[in-house]
Image: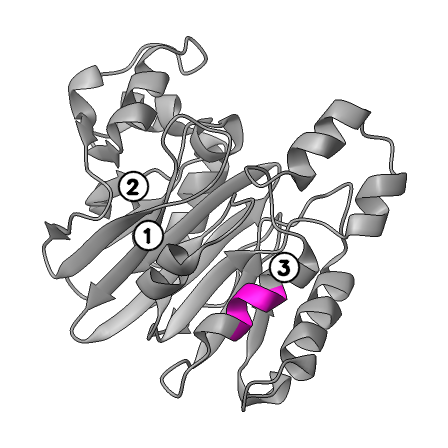
Amino acid sequence: MRVCCIASGSSGNCTYVGTDTAHILIDAGLSGKKTREGVESLDITLDDIDGIFLTHEHSDHIKGLGIILRKHDIPVYGTPGTIEAIENTQDLGEYDHSLLHTIEPDEKFILKDINLRPVNIAHDAAQPVGYRIESEGRSFGMITDIGSYTDYTIENMRGVNCMMIEANHDVRMLETGRYPYPLKKRILSDHGHLSNEKAGDFLDTILNDQIESLIIGHLSQENNLPELAYEAVRGEIEMSESKYHANDFPLIVASRTHRSEVIEV
């Protein structure tokens, strides 16, 4: 299984997951052009994509969906709440709504040789989810846009070989930045976004001998820096009481504007 973040950040998100026989995208929050270029850089085309799986309906996760569906008949999957919210928005323009399909949290969905399980997450959207994705005994966990996590979240991501979690903001940058107070309050809430430190705390809870790589993504352009997120997450892992250390696992910071390296899971 291969994983590649085409881009991840508060301005747009799209991640590729694929095998030799199946190719999927998680979210379509980039422009149609940027999505196409990102996919083609992986030596496939959008016509090879077997499905687009949505985490939720916010613009930075779906804004390229309309133009993609006007040019390509790709099935789109999301929770009932997410699909309803998308059908009610006018922002995507005209497209074939029959391409939209619902999937249920905590129920396995099989697409060729890829098994996906949507996992409920805490975020201020209609019915948001992360995903645990498995193929041939290997697993990838992906959670972005989450304000807090519980034992349920941890259990659903336990034992993965690769984990992607958001490290959205540095708390001090957010608190002293130019965002209006209501927006700061939303971001810091239990249904907002994880800080760098909380991302590190979460990763520490799911570290195991099978994990081979860690990815942090969805960094805020206004309230975070890649170097700051990297050091803060490593620091939380290093200072924890677990047997693992920050140097035990490669830690990749997904770019807001460029695709990451391809990770073999």
Pinpoint residue 173: horizontal percent, then vertical percent: 84, 47
Question: Which residues fall within the magenta stretch?
Answer: 200-204
- The answer to which of 43 and 134 lies nearer the viewer is 134
Instruction: State the CA–CA distance, disc 2 to disc 1.
Output: 9 Å
Secondary structure found at label 1: strand
Q: Residue at x 39, y 56 (%)?
A: 153
Q: Quadrant of residue 188?
A: top right
Instruction: State the CA–CA distance, disc 1 to disc 3.
Output: 19 Å
Bin the neighbour count of mark 2 within 10 Å (Cα to Cα): few under 14, some 14-19, many 20 and up. many
Secondary structure found at label 3: helix
Q: Quadrant of the N terminus?
A: bottom left
Q: Which residue is mark 3?
A: 198
- The answer to which of 31 and 78 lies nearer the viewer is 78
Of the image marks 1 and 3, the number of the one nearer the N terminus? 1
Of the image marks 2 and 1, the number of the one nearer the N terminus? 2
Please tell me whether residue 174 belongs to the stretch shown in magenta.
Answer: no
Of the image marks 2 and 3, the number of the one nearer the N terminus? 2
- The answer to which of 40 and 6 lies nearer the viewer is 6
Residue type (three-letter) at the residue carrying disc 3: Lys
Q: Which residue is mark 2?
A: 53
Instruction: State the CA–CA distance, disc 2 to disc 3.
Output: 25 Å
Q: Are marks 2 and 1 in contact (CB under 8 Å)?
A: yes
Residue type (three-letter) at the residue carrying disc 1: Tyr
Residue type (three-letter) at the residue carrying disc 2: Phe
Secondary structure found at label 2: strand
Pinpoint residue 170: horizontal percent, then vertical percent: 76, 53
Q: Which residue is mark 1?
A: 131
Q: Quadrant of the C terminus?
A: bottom left
* Numbered label attached to residue 83: none
